[in-house]
Image (cartoon, rainbow, N blue to C red):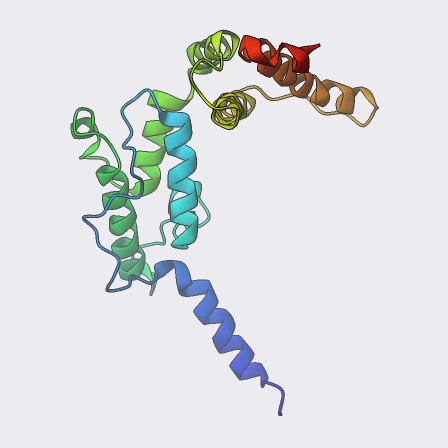
């Protein structure tokens, strides 16, 4: 089998470079990217779900600056505008109707994303407080051990996204990173029902 020519390689590279601009017939602008719409209180989990969905559709670059708006004279300007409108529409459809109206007149998906981050994503203090409070008060109750573990894991994962641990090259960095793991284990044990006293001891 003959190896591909330089021209064929160049064409494949150009197609791959333009993949983010493709809009498929199945790309419905009326669709929502996520099941749980942004309501102002769930930005962290909503943000992550939207990024995963856009990444799967090869459209993440429209919100993270990897696919910047080309000049109006560029060949791909019309294609870029069409794809950006699609992403913009998906984002709007992923926001609760109670808050979406204040975002309708923003121009691009990137500008909308920055506005959402500024409004709902920068004030981590109250979110950190709420998560730590939920973790501290979590108990097994009527949950199965597996469901209780899943609940605590979700809360601690959300918290770790908000609280960054400084890194260094010394051994202290690893020890510092291990602290939340030990805390999570202790909280899990504390919240277990009394029937698990033998596990705690």
Q: Is residue 73 visible?
A: no
Counting labels gives 0
Q: Which residue is pictured at 49% across the width and 24% down the height?
A: 158
Q: Is residue 104 visible?
A: yes
In the rendered view of the protein, which quadrant contains the C terminus?
top right
- Residue 98 left/right relative to 146: left
Q: Nearer the viewer, residue 148 or 181?
A: 148
Q: Position of residue 122 (x, y in %)?
A: 43, 20
Q: Position of residue 187 (x, y in %)?
A: 59, 12
Q: Which residue is pictured at 27% across the width and 24% down the height?
A: 39
Quadrant of residue 40 within the rendered picture: top left
Q: Nearer the viewer, residue 68 or 59?
A: 59
- Residue 112 left/right relative to 123: left
- Residue 123 left/right relative to 173: left
In the image, farthest residue toward the bottom: 1
Q: Position of residue 172 (x, y in %)?
A: 80, 19
Q: Which residue is pictured at 26% across the width and 44% down the height?
A: 90
């Amino acid at each position: 089998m003959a190896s591909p020519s330089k021209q064929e390689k160049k064409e494949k590279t150009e197609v791959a470079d333009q993949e983010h601009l493709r809009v498929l017939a199945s790309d419905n602008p009326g669709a929502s990217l996520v099941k749980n719409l942004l309501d102002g209180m769930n930005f962290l989990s909503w943000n992550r779900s939207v990024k995963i969905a856009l990444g799967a559709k090869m459209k993440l670059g429209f919100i993270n600056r990897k696919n910047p708006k080309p000049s109006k004279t560029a060949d791909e300007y019309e294609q870029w505008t069409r794809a950006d409108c699609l992403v913009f529409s998906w984002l709007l459809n992923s926001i609760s109707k109670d808050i979406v109206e204040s975002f309708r007149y923003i121009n691009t998906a990137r500008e909308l994303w920055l506005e959402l981050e500024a409004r709902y994503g920068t004030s981590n203090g109250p979110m950190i407080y709420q998560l730590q409070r939920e973790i501290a008060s979590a108990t097994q109750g009527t949950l199965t051990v597996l469901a209780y573990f899943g609940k605590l894991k979700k809360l601690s994962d959300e918290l770790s996204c908000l609280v960054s641990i400084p890194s260094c090259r010394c051994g202290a960095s690893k020890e510092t990173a291990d602290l939340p793991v030990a805390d999570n284990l202790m909280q899990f044990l504390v919240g277990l029902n009394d029937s698990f006293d033998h596990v705690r001891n």
